[in-house]
Amino acid sequence: MSFITDDHEEFRSAVRKFTDEEIVPIAADIDSYKYPDIPQEIIKKMAEQGYFGVIFPEEYDGLGLDYITLSIVSEELSKGLLSVGSVMTRGILTGTLLLAHGTEDQKKRFLPGIATGELMTAAAFTEPDFGSDSGGMITKATKVDGGYILNGSKAWCTFANRANYLTVLARTDSDLTKRHKGLSIFMVEKEPGEDIIHPNIKGEPIPTVGYHGMKSYNLSLEDVFVPEENLIGTEENRGFYQLMETYEAARLQTAARAVGVAQAAFDFALQYSKEREQFGKPISEHQAIRMKLSEMATELEAARQLVYYAASMKDSGKRCDLEAGMAKIKSAKAGEYVTREAMQILGGYGYSKEFPVERFWRDARVISIFEGTSEIQHEVIAKSLLSK
Ligand SMILES: Cc1cc2nc3c(=O)[nH]c(=O)nc-3n(C[C@H](O)[C@H](O)[C@H](O)COP(=O)(O)OP(=O)(O)OC[C@H]3O[C@@H](n4cnc5c(N)ncnc54)[C@H](O)[C@@H]3O)c2cc1C
């Protein structure tokens, strides 16, 4: 059974062309910090193609397409550079949150901007002492006249500098024993820029192994006022539940990003194996290399099909946290395995900065860590299986 229609393939061809023309030529320069972040010009061109609005309804200026199309777009852009395939992740997370749980006023205020790429968001969920254990988070939102005052620290807030809004998870019930039952989500407005621009928010980027093109920030929030109409939904203390329900969309998209990085590594290694000769023949004619290529292609295709399967479930309106978790685990593993083997096929050149394979390998490593670690995905899956 194939999940892919002719329309999907047509969309794929267009994104592939965009990636080849716009991203591939500057991917190495972005990776080596010749640009501080992904150039604004690229984001503008992605917006013109409608990539930020693939899954959002047309009434909110989106394309109104399906999650399979979103997976294809994410995969193809990530073939060029992981961070480019990741710019839209934040909008998907915040946009799906708003679509499912926002008030009509919030949908009207934020969704068209997110769908058209005019409004960038960044997710401020993780804290220095609470990552996987989001129920423990201590950033505080205190009710005041007309809104809330936020105080606390956030970690790893990716693209915080370039965002117009931070989507912040904060504690509205000060009783810490309430854990995940005391959290709410706020849209915190700020100015986008090269660094963090906000009178009450300070931040420093965290140096990372890969995923260059987007900086991830440690942030400190000190007496940040948020108007009450920027609490997502109408009720306090619903944040954790709102987030869990919409995480599956971001996890699916993340899994597709891993498939893209792995495919790029595979394509490069395949071509190299046909051109590189050792012992008088192309290395692709040595059995050990042939085995690698066939195993890499098999793992890659299995991961891709799991992504499409989870996306098709989401498209049919079903919850797919289990399947999105499986797709994320599988594609993270495939990403690490395929990029590692691609490096091996290139031998010494694989380890050099002259070729992009070492970048694919560095980038693939993060997939099992962000958007919920693989260990947490295993927990989610096991819980679901055992509860049946
Ligand atoms: C490059 C990058 C970008 C990121 N971008 C963002 C972002 O934009 N916004 C944001 O909010 N966060 C972001 N994150 C944070 C990311 O989501 C967290 O790193 C992740 O959730 C894990 O949290 P932690 O790092 O605190 O690890 P911890 O939660 O401390 O986990 C440490 C280890 O223990 C394991 N572990 C924890 N609990 C369990 C358990 N119950 N069972 C089994 N094993 C367990 C974990 O799997 C992990 O291996 C980013 C991270 C990175 C690296």
Image (cartoon, rainbow, N blue to C red):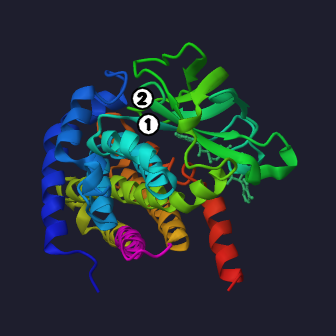
Residue placed most toward the observer, 281 or 266: 266
**Residue 99 in sight here:** yes
> Which amino acid lies under the numbered mark 1 shown in the image of this protein?
Thr
Circle 2 SS class: loop
Looking at the picture, does residue 273 appear above or below residue 296? Answer: above
| Residues at marks 1 and 2, CA–CA distance in whole angstroms | 6 Å
The residue sitting at 70% across, 49% down in the picture is 237
Up-down relation of residue 172 to residue 200 (above or below): below
Question: Residue drawn 26% across and 60% down?
Answer: 64
The residue labelled by disc 2 is 164
Q: The C terminus appears in which quarter of the rendering?
A: bottom right
Sequence-earlier tag: 1 or 2: 1
Q: Residue 14 location, x and y as percent?
A: 13, 54
Cβ atoms at labels 1 and 2 below 8 Å apart: yes
Q: Main secondary structure of the magenta part?
A: helix
Q: x and y percent of residue 158 in the render?
A: 49, 35
Q: Is residue 290 left or right of residue 313?
A: left
Instruction: Determine crowd level at label 2: few under 14, some 14-19, many 20+ residues with C-alpha closer than 10 A.
Output: many
Nearest the eye: 306 or 176: 176
Residue 361, visible in the rendered structure: no
Q: Secondary structure at mark 1?
A: strand
Compared across the picture, whether 211 is left or right of 80 comes to: right
Residues rendered magenta in the picture: 298-319
